[in-house]
Image (tube, helix red, strand yellow):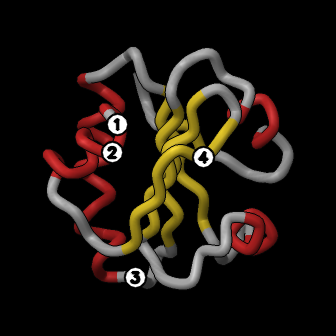
């Protein structure tokens, strides 16, 4: 499955997903975000049991504020409509998958 571009228009349907959701808050100008992005893409392709989305903080700052994103990249895991995990900074793929497994 490919990564979904998440914005204020589709966020509520993403949040309501039956699948665990991984959200990647990023910006195009962010070096660590560019390092994490291909890992998030791989996770989306290899793990169809998850819904994976990316939120550009420059185009959707209100979503970033609602999650209290202070630094990027920030990864957020939502299960059953609730945030169960949140992590700031670049992470290796194994740690990102561990966030989803918790």
Q: CA distance from mark 1 to mark 3?
A: 27 Å
Residue 89 lies, with reference to residue 45, above or below; the image says below
Residue 99: which numbered mark, if any?
Answer: 2
The spot of residue 79 in percent (x, y) is 57, 31
Q: Secondary structure beneath disc 2?
A: helix
Compare marks 2 and 4 and give the one earlier in the sequence: 4
How packed mark 2 is, by other alpha carbons closer than 10 Å (few <14, some 14-19, many 20 or more), is some
Residue of label 1: 102
Look at the numbered disc 4 and give the secondary structure of its residue: strand
Q: Residue at x 78, y 29 (%)?
A: 13
Q: Which residue is mark 4?
A: 83
Give the quadrant of residue 91.
Answer: bottom left
Measured Cα–Cα span from mark 2 to mark 4: 11 Å
CA–CA distance in space, label 2 to label 3: 22 Å
Q: Vertical placement of 87 versus 44: above or below? A: below
Q: How many marks?
A: 4
Counting from the top left corner in percent of width and height, residue 76 is at 50, 53
Asked if labels 4 and 3 touch by Cβ distance under 8 angstroms, the answer is: no
Q: Earlier in the sequence, mark 4 or mark 1?
A: 4
Camera-side mark, 2 or 3:
2
| Cβ atoms at labels 2 and 1 below 8 Å apart | yes
Q: Gap between marks 2 and 1, in whole Å?
A: 6 Å
| Numbered tag placed on residue 30 in the rendering | 3
């Amino acid at each position: 499955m490919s990564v979904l571009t998440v914005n204020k228009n589709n966020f509520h349907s993403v949040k309501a997903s039956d699948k665990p959701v991984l959200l990647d808050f990023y910006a195009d100008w962010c070096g660590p975000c560019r390092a994490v992005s291909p890992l998030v893409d791989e996770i989306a392709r290899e793990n169809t049991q998850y819904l994976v989305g990316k939120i550009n903080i420059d185009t959707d700052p209100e979503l970033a504020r609602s999650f209290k994103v202070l630094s990027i990249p920030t990864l957020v895991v939502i299960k059953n409509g609730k945030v169960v995990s949140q992590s700031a900074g670049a992470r290796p793929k194994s740690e990102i998958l561990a966030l989803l497994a918790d």
